[in-house]
Image (spheres, rainbow, N blue to C red):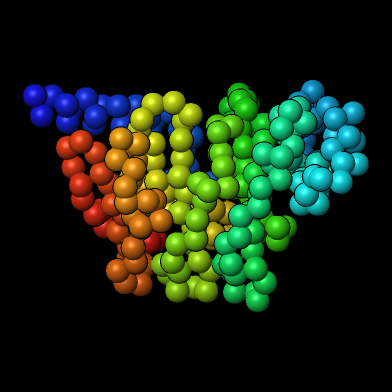
Amino acid sequence: MRKTVSIIIFVITLIFLSCKDDKNLEVGATIKNNETSNWKDYWEKPNERAELIANPIIHERIKQCLKDTSIIVLTSMILENPTNYSKVKYLGDINKDGLNDSILIIPELYITKDKSYENGASVIFTDNQIPRIKVDVSCLETEYIFRAFDIDDDGIAELGKYYTSCASRFKTLELISLKNNNWNILGQVLFDTWYENPIIEERIRKIGQNKFQMREITEEIDIWKTFIAQ
């Protein structure tokens, strides 16, 4: 019976991971302006954009995104619940520039390489020099991102990232790193929501330069997986 359950969990995990875009190379690639020209006014309605830019409760960083022609913000979603997109999470100085970094969430149209699309979201930083982190689902919260360690000792802290498909008990926990102005995945493990403890921040630990472990817990296993940052 335990073997059968283990096989089922393994198959579900493979299906879940295969449904995600190929993020092993890059997280949140920027789309060229000419690829968004036919999408922007339909999803980011001009009248809604103007209303949000004029709204004093909308964070200035979100307003910058609304004025950025390379980003397609789902304006209707913000208008439905502006308070939800006003939440700011403090991460501290992650890039050693002496300034504190914080994050917000924006709903963003996610366009794939083959030009299909779906409602997505992005983590944006109050420092607009730090690239945003895009995901292909709309269920994203500031609490899904947390500061981890400086795994490669380059002066920039890596981030933990919780990914949910918005359904199913099986999620993923990722460690992402900023390299060449892109967020890259260094490691990921299955996150079974039936086992919420320990908290996600305690499931990643540095064990040496460029070496770290991530804890995976399911009905069948509880192990620390070891990764080497490339």
Measured from the top left, where is residue 166 in percent x and y?
A: 48, 29
- Identify which residue is drawn at 29% across, 40% down: 195
Instruction: Name which quarter of the figure residue 37 lies in.
Output: top right
Asked if 20 appears above or below 98 in the picture, the reply is above
Along the line of sight, the residue nearer the viewer: 12 or 82: 82
Along the line of sight, the residue nearer the viewer: 35 or 21: 21
Residue 117 left/right relative to 14: right
Measured from the top left, where is residue 206 in percent x and y?
A: 34, 66
Res 227 seen here: no
- Identify which residue is drawn at 45% across, 74% down: 153
Measured from the top left, where is residue 61 in percent x and y?
A: 76, 52
- Identify which residue is drawn at 62% across, 47% down: 123
Residue 133 left/right relative to 58: left
Asked if 45 appears above or below 179 in the picture, the reply is above
Along the line of sight, the residue nearer the viewer: 162 or 131: 162
Residue 98 left/right relative to 185: right
Along the line of sight, the residue nearer the viewer: 126 or 89: 89
- Which quarter of the rendering shows the N terminus? top left
Residue 4 left/right relative to 160: left
Picture mark count: 0
Instruction: Name which quarter of the figure residue 150 lies in.
Output: bottom left
Asked if 193 appears above or below 161 in the picture, the reply is above
